[in-house]
Amino acid sequence: MTTETAELDQIVSGLSAPQKRISSKYFYDERGSQLFDDITQLPEYYLTNTELGIMRNNIAEIAELVGKQASLIEFGSGSSLKTRILLEHLSELAAYVPVDISKDHLYASAQKIRNSFPHIDVLPVVADFTQEFALPKPMVMPVRNIVYFPGSTIGNFEHDTAVSLLRVMHHEAGKGGALLIGVDLQKDPAIIESAYNDSAGLTAEFNLNMLRHLNRNFGASFDIEKFAHYANYDQDEGRVVIKLVSQADQTFSVGDTEFDIADGETILTEYSHKYTLDGFAAMAHAAGFSVEKVWTDDESLFSVQFLTRQ
Ligand code: AVJ
């Protein structure tokens, strides 16, 4: 089966469930990635700037924990400013290995990193990082592997899949390895809700753009005008639930499959989990990690954590 048929099958099966669902990975076509970049600049979206501040304030200690001649393995393409801060401060890095499923995006951002850091051995790997993958051999033998997973992207995964993703990281880190990860924290629900219901309407655009992406790339027939953005923080579950709400009784198709959706019925497009420090530590533990160090901001909005293999 080609990747595309497999993906189409997955989309159709998600939309066939009682709670219709489309994976949040379909946010990120070219326009979606641009919209997400714009979201990170919004005053309400505290995550990115807070994480950046934590990195800047603690970079000497982070570099010290990483140590010399590590191989930095980033889960994701590595186009963020946070990655650049790390690369600027880690000494004698053996290699930088960004891992991403989207080849074009990965190679383009790897080239930009090479241009800025000509002394670093940049070895991009095209892979679905939710499954174990083979690491490239750097020119210099690394002392240890440090997996980097910024942005609280871990929050997109439900508990069991988050643990299995952490297990993949544990595997890729290898003996003596560690994980440096950005983790968003539970806090005043009003702060969280405004981050996902911004006044400029960018998050709504980002959410609706998923339907445009499916229309363009998977032969879907969504009428974008007839859906509305919804985001709500479920305090009991500790997660933001993001949906598209149908504004009418309507039908749409994806490939050859037709779907009915009622007025007010929803399509779940994303969970964004927020953690307590204890809750995250328990998850890390289940995957074989111990929390060695947690850095946070003055208001404890966000955390950057250094986990070592048990
Ligand atoms: C990239 C998954 C961390 O959950 O905050 C932003 C994605 N969704 N606004 C998040 C997102 C809506 C973001 N992550």
Image (cartoon, rainbow, N blue to C red):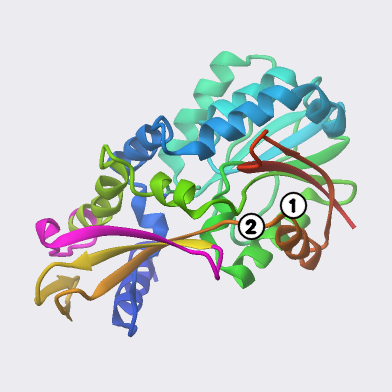
The verdict on label 2 being within 8 Å of ligand 1 is no
Quarter of the picture holding the N terminus: bottom left
Q: In percent of the image, x 74 and y 44: which residue is there?
A: 305
Mark 2 highlights which residue?
A: 275
Q: Dot 1: few (<14), some (14–19), or many (≥20) neighbours within 10 Å?
A: many
Q: Is residue 286 visible?
A: yes
Residue at disc 1, secondary structure: helix
Instruction: Find residue 92 and report its image quarter.
Output: top right
- Residue 177 position within the rendered picture, expressed as x and y whole percent measured from the top left: 84, 46
Instruction: Find residue 302 and report its image quarter.
Output: top right
Q: Nearer the viewer, residue 76 or 55?
A: 55
Left/right placement of residue 140 relative to residue 264 reads: right
Quarter of the picture holding the C terminus: bottom right
Left/right placement of residue 158 relative to residue 137 reads: left
Mark 1 highlights which residue?
A: 172
179 to 82, vertically: above or below:
below
Residue 200 belongs to magenta span: no
Q: Nearer the viewer, residue 100 or 182?
A: 182
110 to 165, vertically: above or below:
above
Q: Magenta region: which residues? A: 216-238
- Residue 115 position within the rendered picture, expressed as x and y whole percent measured from the top left: 54, 15
Left/right placement of residue 74 relative to residue 192 reads: right
60 to 5, vertically: above or below:
above
Residue at disc 2, secondary structure: loop
Q: Nearer the viewer, residue 50 or 152?
A: 50
Mark 1: which amino acid?
Glu
